[in-house]
Amino acid sequence: MRPVNMAICAFSVACGGLIGGQPLERLAGVLAFEADGGFPAWAIRVAYAAVSASLILAAGNAFNDVRDIETDRINAPRRPIPSGMVSTAAAVVLSVMLCAAGLILSLPLGGAGIAVAITAAVLLFLYDVRLKGVPLAGNVSVAFLGGLAFVYGGVAGDCIRESLVPAVFAILLHLGRELVKDAEDVEGDREAGLSTAATAWGVRTALRLAAAVLIVLLIATAIPFFNGYFGLPYALVLLFGVWPAVRMGAVLAFRPPARDRISRASLFLKIAMPAGILAVLAGFQGRSPL
């Protein structure tokens, strides 16, 4: 189920909902409850969305492990299915149950929320059965899902427009990391006959493409500060939290391929994810509505 990825997903959705106003003020309102002793309606909706998204992601992760059993025997033999701890049938049942629960939790969010949840579930399924074996298509689909988490929170928190900024950043970050992961998993993917960016175009090409995407991300994240959309708090978190991790990921990806170097690049980019969420929250804190 990948609990860490589930937590990052839920955190992303929550961020998408918090930026409908001053994040700290919205959060304080949730902690203090409303005058009638209940949670704000938007907070309840965001909570539904956060749990829903994490369950749908977990469903996709479980089904992905079923589909990747042959490659995981080489790339990740300690995972539950290749290690024999869990059967493929049990994993499929778990995946279906998690997906159903995630979709049910989207019902209180209305038509837009349900549409986002169904889109995510369908795209995860298509990724597992088809898109993962198509160079770049699988990477783009996962990156799109990373951005969709913020939009899902924006739908729940009535701030779709504001959620588009972090969604774009998330798409670029996830795309760069997915290309790095292609290079990291090239041995097992090649053995299984999968056509990924690394197996089709070579590890060096996949890594250089990842580095290029990460450079675009570094430039893109600077724009909201220089055009006045975000203030100094955003720049500080960006400068000391996000950019160092993304820069290290890009530098390691651009160097000659080596498995340990590629693994470190992937780790740095994963660290950049929660740091990026904090930067966005800092950016919206104190920002005047347009």
Image (spheres, helix red, strand yellow):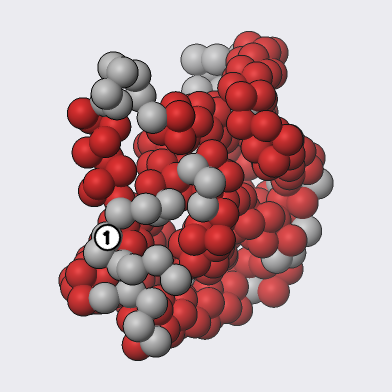
Relative to 250, residue 161 above or below: above
Total label count? 1
Q: Which residue is at the front of the view, 61 or 222?
A: 222
At horizontal 53% and vertical 46% (from top left) the residue drawn is 158
Q: In the depicted view, which residue is nearer to us: 282 or 195? A: 282
Residue 102 in which image quadrant: top right
Could you tell me residue 182's position as x and y percent?
58, 59
Quarter of the rendering containing residue 264: bottom left
Q: In the picture provided, is 86 more to the left or to the right than 190?
A: left
Name the residue carrying label 1: 285
Residue 216 in view: yes
Q: Is residue 112 left or right of residue 263?
A: right
Residue 52, above or below 167: above
Query: The C terminus lies in which quarter of the figure?
Result: bottom left
Residue reaching furthest bottom?
A: 226
Residue 199 visible somewhere in the drawing: no
| Amino acid residing under circle 1 | Gln
**Secondary element at tag 1:** loop
Task: Pick the residue in front: 46 or 68.
Answer: 46
User: Looking at the image, which residue is at 31% across and 67% down?
Assistant: 287
Q: Is residue 276 above or below residue 74?
A: below
Image coordinates for residue 10, horizontal then vertical, percent: 43, 37
> Which class describes the residues within 10 Å of circle 1: few (<14), some (14-19), or many (20+)?
many
- Residue at 27 percent across and 40 percent down: it is 27
Q: Position of residue 218 (x, y in %)?
A: 40, 79
Which residue occupies the extreme front position in the image? 35
Give me the residue at 28% from left, 17% from top: 37
Question: Residue 273's x, y, as percent?
Answer: 37, 56
Locate residue 144 relative to residue 286 in the image: left or right: right
